Amino acid sequence: MNHHQDEIDALMRRIVDLSDESLVLLSQYISFLKWQEEQWHSPELWEDVRDEEVVWVYDLIDHFSESRQAATVDMKGMEVKVAAASCEGLIRPAIWQHPPVAGEGVIEYQVDTPLELDALKFKFAAGVRDGALLSEDNQVAFRIRVNGRLIWSHLKKEAGWDDFLIDLPTLTGQTMVIQLITDALGNSRWNWAVWGEPRILGLLRT
């Protein structure tokens, strides 16, 4: 116990010397570590979401005009827009994000999250639109980064929707930088990638 307290005291002495900007980054990283521990120790904790627990919603389609689009290498070949998308005949509101010829395509949002929330989740579908001719050697990668850290990735090699509900780091009351990323993995032909109904959900547990 004394050793543990000594470590805390030494850490506090280092923290007081940090700049305001570094303190903000430290707070975000602590929140990220707390989220990681929750995933490790209680993977079933947030398995189900009841409607009455969702008290705040940030719809990425509604806020699309506030997003920033970029590419890690070159924007050649990118197509980014909001439109309905059909995957296996199921039509959903979506963000289209055909990746660039080289590197990643990035759609970035800065989201101010309410302080009073208990948890954050991201509900969405990753899809490839009908008509695309993907194969084993021609896939598209979907990724999500939060505050620069990769928290989720998925590969698709066929048309259709895959639905997801993932936990986000506990960044309530802070500004979250969330990035939707697609990557052609060297072959961008037929990479008709779309994000269906992407929404950040804020939960209050009762």
Image (cartoon, rainbow, N blue to C red):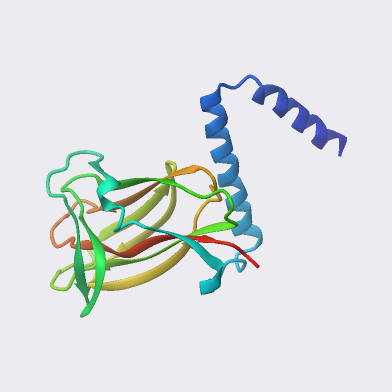
Q: Is residue 69 above or below residue 56?
A: above
Residue 133 vs residue 200: left or right?
A: left
Q: Farthest residue in the right direction? A: 2
Residue 76 image offset from top left, x and y in percent: 12, 44
Q: Can residue 158 be seen here?
A: yes
Q: In this view, does 195 lie above or below 180?
A: below
Residue 8 image offset from top left, x and y in percent: 75, 32
Q: Can residue 88 be seen here?
A: no
Of residue 75 and residue 122, the one placed in the foreground of this image is 122
Residue 87 vs residue 169: left or right?
A: left
Q: Farthest residue in the top direction? A: 17
Q: Quadrant of the N terminus?
A: top right
Residue 140 image offset from top left, x and y in percent: 25, 59
Give the quarter of the image for residue 135.
Answer: bottom left
Q: Farthest residue in the bottom direction? A: 89
Q: Quadrant of the C terminus?
A: bottom right
At horizontal 58% and vertical 37% (from top left) the residue drawn is: 27
Give the quarter of the image for residue 136.
Answer: bottom left
Of residue 195 and residue 20, the one placed in the foreground of this image is 20
At horizontal 66% and vertical 59% (from top left) the residue drawn is: 41
Give the quarter of the image for residue 2.
Answer: top right
At horizontal 55% and vertical 39% (from top left) the residue drawn is: 29
At horizontal 60% and vertical 41% (from top left) the residue drawn is: 30
